[in-house]
Image (cartoon, rainbow, N blue to C red):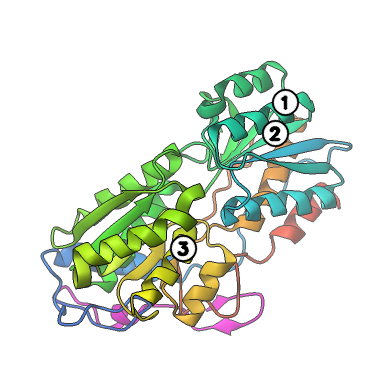
């Protein structure tokens, strides 16, 4: 069973997965199959594989499976979280986890907001280095966009830990990071694309929303595109580059344009961050679209509280592939503690999970059970 903190709900297998065969699929949202599209398009094998992957990701349990041993808490440490933009719910969620875990372990944890611009990020990073903390978090931006500050921190012997800072989890040599915290971007991209393939029966008309100024995000959206292309009958209608910081202004205008251009051919959307659908919902509503109808939307990352609410209410978002944001904040503190103790990183990578209306329950976050107790025990707190 899928278990949340507040309730036990049925394990999700999208309605389509109960009836999918290599020859067809049908169902209602958690992504409904567009009217009249009941066959597997031109990719029956891809559809079958995608359906199996969606089923597995949706059934990932809520029990945390991370490290249970490590060094006891170092004392008197200070860490600074340099945020790409605190209006990004994913970044803000991880920053909150860092602060909460810092309080538990007995450290001073503070946040400096880069406000989503290159100049702002560089200024925030410079401020962090000037503070001479014991550790700095690169929160959701490319270290190479602030290479001078990254080099200064490295030269000063300040350990750097990234969150969505480079494309893969774990330690990085160039740029030099003690570790990078993220789910595997390939898995997130694949399952979000597979959800589109599955719920459309291999016949979607899809739009991708990305922020190409962030290499991590651009890589994710390119991987989504590649996975969609494994089903030739899925049509990529448009690939839209809209900076996250500009989403609230530009997405409504873009939605109106896409509706005008593609009409009912636009059946599905995938965005590298749920924030895009918070901005898209009013424009879709104003155009007379129903919240539980096309285009069906999936967020390929983060999983902020408003996304869970939209999914639960069937309001212009059908699914998200969430990060365990609060848990990742606690993991960042634990990884710093390992760095301060001369230990290697833990090597833990959270598994990919899919949230839909079938398993969202009453939660507002993907927050596995047990990590806080495990880290308290490791740290002796």
The reply to whether dot 1 and dot 2 touch (C-beta < 8 Å) is yes
Residue 129 is tagged as 1
Q: Earlier in the sequence, mark 1 or mark 2?
A: 1
- How far from the left and from the top, in percent, is residue 328? 63, 51
Q: Residue furthest top?
A: 155
Count of picture labels: 3
Q: Nearer the viewer, mark 2 or mark 3?
A: 3
- Which residue in the protein does label 2 denote? 136
- Residue sitting at x 44%, y 46%: 243
Q: Is residue 40 magenta?
A: no
Q: Residues in magenta?
A: 1-22
Please provide percent x and percent y for residue 297: 37, 67
Circle 3 Cα neighbour tier, 10 Å, few/some/many (<14 / 14–19 / ≥20):
some
* 1 or 3: tag closer to the N-terminus: 1
Q: In the figure, residue 231 lies in which quadrant?
A: bottom left
Q: Which residue is mark 3?
A: 279
């Amino acid at each position: 069973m899928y278990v949340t903190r507040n309730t036990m709900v049925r394990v999700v297998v999208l309605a389509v997965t109960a009836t999918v065969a290599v020859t067809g699929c049908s169902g209602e949202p958690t992504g409904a199959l567009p009217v009249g599209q009941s066959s597997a398009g031109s990719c029956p094998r891809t559809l079958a594989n995608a359906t199996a992957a969606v089923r597995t990701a949706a059934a990932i349990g809520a029990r945390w499976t991370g490290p249970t041993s490590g060094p006891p808490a170092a004392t008197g440490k200070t860490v600074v979280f340099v945020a790409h933009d605190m209006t990004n719910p994913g970044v803000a969620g991880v920053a909150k986890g860092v602060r909460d875990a810092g309080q538990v372990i007995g450290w001073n944890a503070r946040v400096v907001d880069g406000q989503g611009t290159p100049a702002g990020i560089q200024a925030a990073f410079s401020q962090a280095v000037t503070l001479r903390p014991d550790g700095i978090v690169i929160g959701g931006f490319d270290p190479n966009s602030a290479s001078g500050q990254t080099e200064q921190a490295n030269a000063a012997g300040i350990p750097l830990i990234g969150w969505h800072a480079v494309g893969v989890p774990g330690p990085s040599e160039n740029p030099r990071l003690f570790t990078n915290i993220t789910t595997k971007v390939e898995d997130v991209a694949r399952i979000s694309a597979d959800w589109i393939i599955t719920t459309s029966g291999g016949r979607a008309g899809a739009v991708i929303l990305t922020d190409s100024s962030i290499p991590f995000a651009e890589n994710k959206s390119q991987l989504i595109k590649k996975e969609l292309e494994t089903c030739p009958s899925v049509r990529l209608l448009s690939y839209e580059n809209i900076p996250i910081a500009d989403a609230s202004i530009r997405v409504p205008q873009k939605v109106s344009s896409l509706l005008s251009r593609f009409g009912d051919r636009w059946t599905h959307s995938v965005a590298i961050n749920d924030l895009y659908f918070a901005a898209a919902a009013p424009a879709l509503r104003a155009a007379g679209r129903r919240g539980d109808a096309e285009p069906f939307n999936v967020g390929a990352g983060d999983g902020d509280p408003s996304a869970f609410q939209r999914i639960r209410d069937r309001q212009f978002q059908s699914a998200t592939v969430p990060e365990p944001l609060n848990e990742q904040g606690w993991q960042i503190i634990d990884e710093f503690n390992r760095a301060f103790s001369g230990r290697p990183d833990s090597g833990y990578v959270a598994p990919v999970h899919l949230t839909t209306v079938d398993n969202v329950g009453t939660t507002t976050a993907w927050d596995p059970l047990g990590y806080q107790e495990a880290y308290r025990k490791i740290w002796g707190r």
